[in-house]
């Protein structure tokens, strides 16, 4: 399937040569755009970005895209921050949640003046899914980044196993546990949720929202990490890996699974269901020797409709940098690269090639994504789940607060802190967070 998709993709990309306006370099000097990209998924992304750069350069004589893989999102953020007062980067894919960190500590620039120059800019803006703009705007409504490499976590399940056991796809967390326990054997986990390691916060947000207590809700001065609903979410997530004799559900590894190892465990038959990013979809579909099912995250208790769906958005946006030294031509070339990557044609290609959610509605109406979703409906699941999605964690002092939350979540989920003490730990953590936010407001 992947090889067929890529042949369609590259043929379609070639057709873009007549689509995007050409930016001419002034005085025949080559403008070099240093483009940093980060990712948290497997796949042949370097080849894909190299193809995009080649196509863009053919459209834009005199402009060169220097594609630089800068590692994980965290490594990319740290690399850019380390460049300090003389940033080398021009455009970067960074976490959407890094917005306030980079407003405060780097040279990202607002994009409103460029957007205003787009013909029918309102239609351009409205073509992006509203959920993806939530992490692109500041409190005053200024646009600081453009959605590109966006995602939500979704649930992957071995449809063959569920069919053999006569199990329906779970729609709330009670059904989730029942299915996971029925699918658990000595050799196989019923469910793996990759919260072991350094960033459990992203997947935890699906449970927090499912219980009605999202960590953030549009106000960067407010973070919720205590209260009864949050405690319930933490307890549920922790009990997934606890042995039954200790009051747990016994359906996965204690402390959760590791992020990078979870898709491999699923493909190897060591996990019947997993939570992971939709950005892993193409890799999993290509390599599975069983029928892969994909569903919304059943992370919360049943509501009035019987479902408990909830998910955060995730992934990276396109940011633009200027320390005040760049020429108008250089800035325009950087913006043209952002417009190219976020165009419906590239978004359709990118979604088909990776499984990330094409951020624009129109991208789903053209090849290759249109034909791919007809053949493989799994690609549309994360898009449709956006109706249940909340913004991803975002706040002032974001990095510090996330580090605190990740540390305390890891302690509880791993069993280092007894569940009986979870409420007190969350309350104390909330006081630390509130103190940091209070400093920001002063």
Image: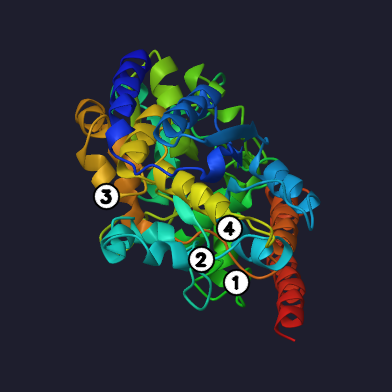
Residue visible at 68% across and 48% down in the picture: 413
Residue visible at 39% across and 28% down in the picture: 353
Task: Work out whether mark 4 precedes mark 1 in sequence or the reverse, and give the earlier one.
Answer: 4
* Image location (x, y in percent) of residue 208: 52, 61
Task: Work out whether mark 3 precedes mark 2 in sequence or the reverse, and give the earlier one.
Answer: 2
Task: Work out whether mark 2 precedes mark 1 in sequence or the reverse, and give the earlier one.
Answer: 2
* Mark 4 residue crowding within 10 angstroms, few (<14) / some (14–19) / many (20+): many
- Residue 214, label in figure: 2
Front tag of 3 and 2: 3
- Is residue 415 something that shows in the picture? no
- Residue 224, label in figure: 1
Front tag of 4 and 1: 4
Is 117 placed left or right of 429 in the picture?
left
Q: CA distance from mark 2 to mark 1?
A: 7 Å
The answer to whether 64 is drawn above or below residue 188 in the figure is below
* Image location (x, y in percent) of residue 92: 59, 46
Mark 3, residue position: 361
């Amino acid at each position: 399937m992947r090889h067929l998709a890529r042949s369609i993709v590259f043929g379609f990309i070639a057709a873009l040569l007549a689509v995007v306006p050409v930016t001419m370099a002034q005085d025949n000097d080559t403008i070099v755009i240093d483009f940093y990209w980060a990712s948290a998924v497997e796949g042949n992304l370097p080849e894909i970005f190299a193809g995009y750069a080649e196509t863009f350069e053919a459209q834009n004589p005199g402009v060169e895209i220097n594609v630089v893989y800068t590692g994980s999102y965290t490594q990319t953020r740290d690399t850019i921050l380390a460049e300090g007062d003389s940033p080398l980067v021009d455009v970067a894919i960074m976490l959407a949640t890094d917005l306030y960190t980079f407003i405060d500590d780097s040279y990202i620039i607002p994009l409103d003046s460029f957007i205003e120059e787009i013909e029918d800019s309102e239609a351009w803006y409205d073509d992006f899914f509203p959920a993806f703009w939530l992490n692109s705007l500041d409190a005053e409504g200024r646009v600081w980044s453009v959605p590109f490499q966006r995602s939500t976590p979704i649930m992957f399940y071995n449809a063959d196993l569920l069919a053999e056991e006569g199990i329906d796809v779970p729609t709330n967390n009670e059904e989730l546990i029942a299915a996971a326990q029925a699918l658990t054997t000595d050799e196989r986990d019923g469910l793996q949720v990759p919260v072991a390691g350094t960033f459990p916060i992203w997947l935890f947000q699906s449970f927090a929202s499912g219980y009605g207590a999202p960590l953030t809700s549009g106000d960067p001065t407010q973070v919720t990490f205590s209260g009864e609903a949050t405690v319930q979410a933490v307890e549920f997530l922790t009990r997934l890996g606890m042995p039954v004799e200790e009051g747990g559900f016994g359906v996965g590894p204690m402390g959760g699974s590791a992020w990078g190892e979870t898709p491999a465990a699923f493909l190897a038959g060591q996990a019947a269901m997993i939570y992971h990013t939709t950005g892993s979809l193409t890799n999993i579909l290509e390599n599975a020797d069983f029928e892969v099912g994909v569903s919304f995250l059943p992370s919360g208790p049943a509501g009035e409709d019987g479902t408990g769906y909830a998910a955060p958005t995730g992934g990276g946006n396109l940011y633009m940098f200027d320390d005040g030294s760049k020429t108008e031509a250089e800035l325009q070339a950087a913006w043209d690269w952002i417009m190219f990557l976020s165009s419906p044609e590239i978004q359709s290609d990118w979604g088909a090639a990776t499984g990330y959610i094409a951020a624009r509605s129109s991208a789903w109406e053209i090849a290759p994504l249109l034909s791919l979703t007809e053949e493989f409906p799994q690609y549309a699941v994360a898009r449709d789940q956006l109706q249940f999605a909340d913004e991803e964690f975002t706040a002032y002092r974001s990095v510090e607060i996330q580090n605190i939350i990740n540390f305390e979540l890891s302690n509880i989920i791993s069993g280092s802190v007894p569940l009986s003490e979870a409420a007190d730990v969350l309350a104390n953590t909330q006081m630390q967070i509130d103190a940091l936010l209070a400093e920001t407001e002063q």
